[in-house]
Image (cartoon, helix red, strand yellow):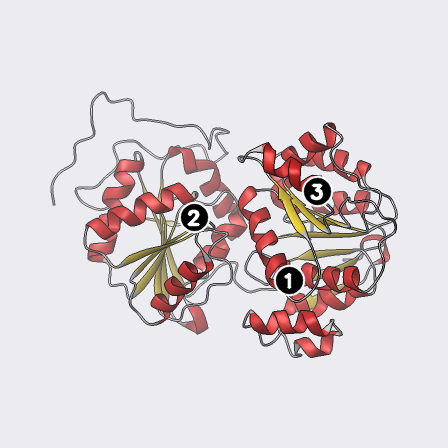
Amino acid sequence: MRPHGGRAINVSKSIMSFENLNLDERLLEAVDACGFTKPTPIQEQAIPVILEGGDLMGSAQTGTGKTAAFVLPILHQIINREPVNKSIGPRCLVVAPTRELAQQVEKDAVDYSKFIKFTQGSVVGGVSYGPQIQMLKRPVDMLIATPGRLLDHMGQGRIDFSRLEFLVLDEADRMLDMGFIGDIRKIVGAVPEKRQTLLFSATLEGPILRMAQSFLKEPESISLTTNTKNHEQIEQRIHWADNVSHKHDLLKHYVAEEEMSQAVIFTSTKRGADELVNQLNKRGQKAAVLHGDLRQSARKKTMDDMHHGKIKLLVATDIAARGLDFKNISHVINFDLPNTAEDYIHRVGRTGRASATGTAISLVCRKDWDYLVSIERLTGKKLKRDNIEGLEAISKEPKNRSTLGNAGRSWKPSRRGSIKRRRR
């Protein structure tokens, strides 16, 4: 793959240490404080390219160390050269598709900049404008934003991009899927042409390549090769569900009947994760939650408890589960399907580590149908359907394999009244 003459690099494994990457000593100290001993493949290949000042398009999924791959070399350059002018606007703009991802990038930037003079801030949807407006009145080195809220502030003239040197489009494929291409074009059109642009995506093909050709100049292309697409050692099953209540009944069955050592249960929202872990604990299960609102101390305790086997069920969101590596995960349960097929593959890969076998179970109702179709298209196979006696769904799986276009809409079975099931 050679967009604009850039060379393609296939990455398989990491062989060097962070010291070989020519990063500022203060950044290496921060990396060490975070507990990282050697760079991941994407970090090993991307950091030198970014330090050289060239544009980059990288294929890397969540959980591969992608954020550090761009944050560290950008920090290095910011602290080792003077800004182009004395304005208070950002020197780096990171655009991410969701609030959770933007907040995670900001957290990582805080961790990696703990020993340097550096400021960062975020403008994301779903929170008050007030603190963001006040933050934008002060100098900021790195601004992390979601497209909609960023455009709102830009429309009010609150952001000065005159000293911007770095533009990062993170998870560009998800931004395309979410319909942000028009917003991205407006944002790119508002920043200086003389800049270093970095684009990261789970895939580098089709629309992503066209986006790169529009926004990047002779970029290097780095593709993180993986062999996780089919997860042959992992048994993957789904159970069709009528609604959320039915999903709870199914989850209760699987937790009680499956031979599982430890399991990660994925939900799509932090609120859903909190509600689910409360229900599990009320049933006497050893369960804990992991999402972006946890304090670092609480996150560390949960991680330690998982490593020591004190927790059997970990309820997590995608963003919070980035980088998790537990040896004894026998099951992954998707209480909610992710909205991208690549995230499904990443979730499932939490089990079946080091050639061990594993089981992945997805609870799927009508609002998840589009996501299931995308997953089966990417994996190239139809997932096995479970059918539990006494917990059969009343509704039927759609016969049409094309997407329904209403994955986000609520749906209830047409039968009036509550759904009654046979007791087990």
Crowd class of label 1 (few under 14; some 14 to 19; many from 20; radius 10 Å): many
Can residue 39 be seen from the camera position used here? no
From the viewer's perspective, is 216 left or right of 35? right
Q: Nearer the viewer, residue 157 or 280?
A: 157
On the rendered image, what quadrant is the N terminus found in? bottom right
Residue 106, position in %: x, y? 61, 52
Which residue corresponds to the image point at 48% horizontal and 47% vertical from the top-left? 376
Look at the numbered disc 1 and give the secondary structure of its residue: helix
Look at the numbered disc 3 and give the secondary structure of its residue: helix
Residue 76, position in %: x, y? 75, 65
Say which residue label 1 marks: 68
Q: CA distance from mark 3 to mark 2?
A: 26 Å
Q: From the image, state whether disc 3 or disc 2 is nearer to you.
A: 3
Residue at far left of view: 423
Look at the numbered disc 2 and give the secondary structure of its residue: loop
From the viewer's perspective, is 374 left or right of 102? left
Crowd class of label 3 (few under 14; some 14 to 19; many from 20; radius 10 Å): some
Q: Are marks 1 and 2 in contact (CB under 8 Å)?
A: no
Say which residue label 3 marks: 207
Is the residue 367 above or below the residue 250 in the image? above
Q: Are marks 3 and 2 in contact (CB under 8 Å)?
A: no
Is the residue 194 above or below the residue 411 in the image? below
Say which residue label 2 marks: 382
Q: CA distance from mark 1 to mark 2?
A: 35 Å
